[in-house]
Amino acid sequence: MSGVKEIVLTFSCQDSKGIVAAVATLFATLGFNIKESSQFEDVEQSRFFMRTVFECPAGYNLNQIRSLFKPLGEQYKMDWQISDSYVKPRVLIAVSQWGHCLNALLNSWKNGSLPIDIVGVVSNHHVMRDLTEWYQLPFHYLPITPSTKAEQEAQLWQLMQDLQSDFLVLARYMQILSDDLCQKLNGRAINIHHSFLPGFKGAKPYHQAFDRGVKLIGATAHFVTADLDEGPIIEQAVERVSHINSPEDMAEIGRDTEAVVLNRAVRWHAEHRVLLNGSKTVVFSK
């Protein structure tokens, strides 16, 4: 393995005195330089979270760095990860018939502003084939019916293995994943929900919002779990509406919000800024 120039260390553990000093001392002794660092203490859970970017001296590879850090990680019983900052995660995108989120992701990826490597698009419809292929990406058609759900999900899971995909993005993929697939994708699948969760879950949230006369609508990006629309939230945003807006108006406003929120969530996850904290997340956003 070749040398690395910059790494991202993320970890969480039970809070105790001296954690930051121990980490800083270890890397300073090895000749590393701190470029960026963020910390958070969940006081209620007495749990500590940290994300630090280090510039690396010449001669270290990723496996060596991990081996050198492992004793400290074990000492504090950390849930930790060390990643090469310059390696972009491989991402598979799933979509159905709405393309606004997909197009935003593809455009950001194409112009180089989204730090991911999109390895393909998978869909249960043909609608997004032309858009995908215009971006010169492989399109995988996996139709699904209630009787073929298990088979289709097995194909989807195998596709992720074949493409060596690090995580899956559900960009308005209008299928509910099975509990089994959700477990396999734990912490590795991001969904965009066209509502400001936890309100207006399920189908037609904009119609639900219209019926309640809401003044704010929004979108939520969250990790996928077996509990529908209950996964740890990564990012949210809202837009103001009024009595003059129809459900269709709200849906149009919401689509723009969805695209922005999903882009942020994917970016932060790709940059190792999102740490799981039980049913919540700690997000070290810029």
Image (tube, helix red, strand yellow):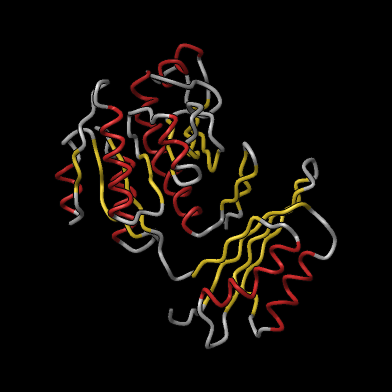
> Relative to 172, is 221 on the left or the right?
right
Residue 44 image point, x, y percent: 79, 40
Q: Quadrant of the N terminus?
A: bottom left
Tell which of 18 and 213 is nearer to you: 18
Residue 278: which quarter of the image? top right
Please report the residue visible at 42 percent of the width from the left and 48 percent of the height from the top.
263
Please report the residue visible at 26 percent of the width from the left and 46 percent of the height from the top.
121
Residue 158 image point, x, y percent: 29, 46
Residue 191: which quarter of the image? top left
- Pick out the residue farthest to the bottom: 58
- Image: 162 above or below 180: below
- Image: 253 above or below 28: above
> Relative to 78, is 152 on the left or the right?
left
Q: Quadrant of the C terminus?
A: bottom right
Tell which of 71 and 32 is nearer to you: 71
Tell which of 60 and 96 is nearer to you: 60
Residue 72: which quarter of the image? bottom right
